[in-house]
Image (spheres, rainbow, N blue to C red):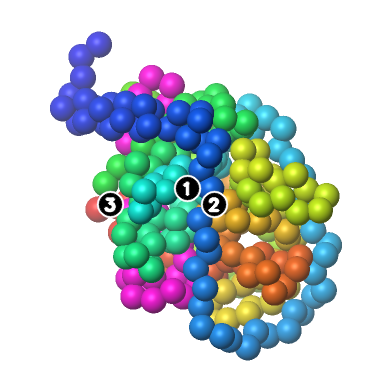
Amino acid sequence: MSTTHTERAHHERWLEISEYWTPERMAAAIPEDVPTMAEETPAPPSALPGAFKTTLVQNPATSSYYRRAGALFYVREGVDLQGSASAITHNGILTAAHCLYGSKVRKYLTKAAYVPGYRDLQEPLGKWPLFGEPVVPDRWKAEVNRAWDYGFSKVGLGGKNGFSVLGNVTGHFELVVDRPELREWDVLGYPAVAIPGYLFDGHRMWSCQGGFTRQPTLNTIGKEGNLTPGSSGGPWLIPGHLYANGVQSYDDGNHPGENFSPYFDSDVLKLYQKAFQS
């Protein structure tokens, strides 16, 4: 099979991340600490949290819905880290900005691999290397502000053979913004910190459905849920549709039964266009 210079460059990148991200490294990767903000006075919840439904996704790679999300493995400051992400175009992913760019150290992630449908150290669909520089809001780079905790990255060719286009294998979600009337989401991710009743370990996908609870700060929203670190970057999806309308950002420990996302407005769309239409 003849290959172009670009295909060879992508394949070499795939070989690099495949060699680095062995099952042993993936098993040892840890969720990144969620960055903290200055003290703030949150608004009270408009609905009491607790009515969420969190379920284990048994075989995400076999579902046309769940395979569009996956685990994100990456390195920062020499530490192997793990988060979540989803395919948002045929050659790119959506995740949390704090996964892509560490505001405290002011460095992008390195040696990053997106593994859709990941389960128990297995890569049934293969892995895709992040390619080029990720795109995060300039305001995120300037300060830790959860309203800007979202970002995008292109991925190179990957899969099982290193030559496959992501969207051709998994499909992808569509971005939806400026929908203030939405009040329920299904969040997919790989929570890694176990809590009573939930054996989260970072190696299995979980789905967490719940409704709106509050707008704690300008341009952030809360929903009923109990996903823990490791789920950062997972998509907030409109139930029954292939539309992403948020991204798992944090649960700050002060509000049990709630998870939070930036509110997806036109700024998110502009960043998406910057990432994928240039």
Residue occupying image coordinates x 75% and y 79%: 45
**Residues in magenta?**
133-162
Residue at figure coordinates x 63%, y 88% from the top left: 41
How many angstroms separate mark 1 from mark 2 (CA)? 5 Å
Q: Which residue is mark 3?
A: 133
Q: Indicate left or right for 235 with 259 as reference.
A: left
Asked whether 100 or 254 is in front, the reply is: 254
* Residue bearing the label numbered 2: 31
Task: Give yes or no for contact between labels 3 and 1 (Cβ–Cβ under 8 Å).
Answer: no
Is residue 167 visible from the viewing direction of this image? no
Q: Are marks 1 and 2 in contact (CB under 8 Å)?
A: yes
Q: Which residue is mark 1?
A: 81
In terms of image quadrants, where is residue 80?
top left
| Of the image marks 1 and 2, the number of the one nearer the N terminus | 2
* Disc 3 to disc 2, C-alpha distance: 21 Å
Give x and y (percent) for residue 16: 31, 30
Magenta stretch: includes residue 210: no
Would you identify the image quadrant in which residue 18 lies?
Answer: top left
Q: SS of the residue at dot 1?
A: strand
Could you say where residue 249 lies in the image, as x and y percent from the top left?
55, 63
Question: At numbered mark 3, what does the secondary structure look like: helix, strand or loop?
Answer: loop
Of labels 3 and 1, earlier in sequence is: 1
Q: Residues within 10 Å of mark 2 (few under 14, many from 20)?
A: many
Disc 1 packing (10 Å; few <14; some 14–19; many ≥20) = many
